[in-house]
Image (tube, helix red, strand yellow):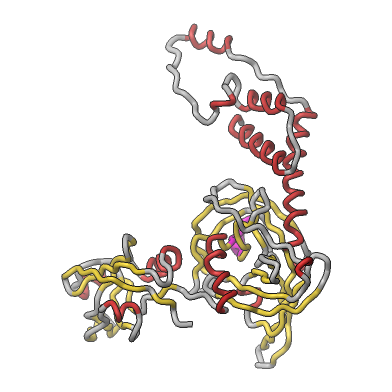
Amino acid sequence: MRARRIILLSLMVASAALSGCSLPNEIIQRALEQASPGSNPAILATPTLTATPSTQQERVALDVDAPTATPLSNDELLALYDAAEAMTIRVYEQVSPSVVFITSQVISMDFFGRTYPSEGTGSGFVIDKAGHIVTNHHVIENARAVEVTLLDQTVVQAEVIGSDAATDLAVLKVDVDPSQLYPVDMSYAEALRVGQTAIAIGNPFGLDWTLTQGVVSSLGRSLDISSERTIYNVIQTDAAINPGNSGGPLLNARGQLIGVNTAIKQDAENIGFAVPLDTVKRVVPQLIEQGYFGHPWLGISGYSLFAELSNRLDLPVDEGILITSISSGGPADLAGLRGAQREQVVGNYRLAVGGDILVAIDEFAIDGSDTLREVLETQIEVGQSVIVTFYRGDQMLTADLFIQAEPN
């Protein structure tokens, strides 16, 4: 209970400051006393250790000497709750003009191969006065036309500037007067923490400009959006996200962007996911500049090793990637790595073997293809020089490798 009171108080004070309100000092002081009776509010974050009373008389004496906190009045409690409400209201009023309603027109095909037009809806948000809007790739995927509705109900055609399926991000552009555009605040630069406020604004089920609120439930999730596509370092939130919220902003208590709402867990409640701001900042500039994002690429194909396969092939390690082929002119080729040299039958399969075994990139151990993809997407950039560690036969070797962009 004490911890919950401290958390509530912290939220109220921050809310009041953000909304331009102020709370009387005596309310804050008394709330602190209730949250932690007998403690000094100035040192709540740095408790000191004291000896445990050894006798019943000492324990009774300590209890008698402990001060009794004066309960907050109803008016004082209402002032704290009003400050929290003011914070949420302020975020909505500040950011809702940045949010847009997106309608995409696609051509679908029925069971008999006949085509027919259909519509999809989603959300997005303005990022600059030039008319660029960020949304999800899946909101505009295969669309032959895209319309954007602004908060003032202006409806305009949008051009798809760039899109990246692997991160589920896309950029649109609209041609409207800059005075109608209100870019979202993308200046948040601190590390997110579980428990922070998470506010989503979007258009679920066509219910335009809807706000829902929750917290950051977890960080660093991996989100499989298809058998071949995984988004890394995803934010999990319990803020309600529904169909139509996709592409809308996920915000902190200051109204700053922290992510792009992208998916929900099927058959579950209050489990939503958002692409983090760091990914947005890395991908979106390239989408605007060249229409696609250059993913870091080694130029190899191969098998993920495991103990049984390694034993069958008499390999020196149980984990890593057994390289089967090298792309000509690619990073691995230029670094001197080798692909398969022969074929070998293992069980009912004929495998390409004899190639190098990749086991590390810089300080990152590579135990298989999934780990390789995650390291490339989250730790490595195009144009970066890295040291790859690999086995050739029983000998461990290293080579300098220059990361290229995956061919588009």
Q: Residue at x 72, y 79 (%)?
A: 146
Q: Is residue 69 magenta?
A: no
At which x and y percent is residue 350? Answer: 28, 85
Taking the spot 62% from the left edge, 74% from the top edge, the residue there is 138
Q: Quadrant of the N terminus?
A: top right
Between 363 and 285, the one nearer to me in the picture: 285
Query: From this viewpoint, is residue 243 visible?
Result: no
Point out residue 43 in the picture as x, y percentages from the top left corner: 54, 26
306 and 70: which is toward the camera: 70
Q: Residue at x 34, y 84 (%)?
A: 329
Image quarter of residue 374:
bottom left
Q: Position of residue 294 (x, y in %)?
A: 48, 75
Where is 48 relative to 348, above or below?
above
Q: Kindly indicate the quadrant of the structure image that contains residue 261.
A: bottom right
* Residue furthest out toward the right: 153
Image quarter for residue 172?
bottom right
Q: Is residue 275 above or below residue 158?
A: above
Q: Which residues are magenta?
A: 263-274
Q: Position of residue 119 (x, y in %)?
A: 73, 79
Residue drawn 54% across the image and 73% down it? 286
Along the line of sight, which residue is nearer the eye, 314 or 234? Answer: 234
Does residue 23 lie above or below 220 as drawn? above
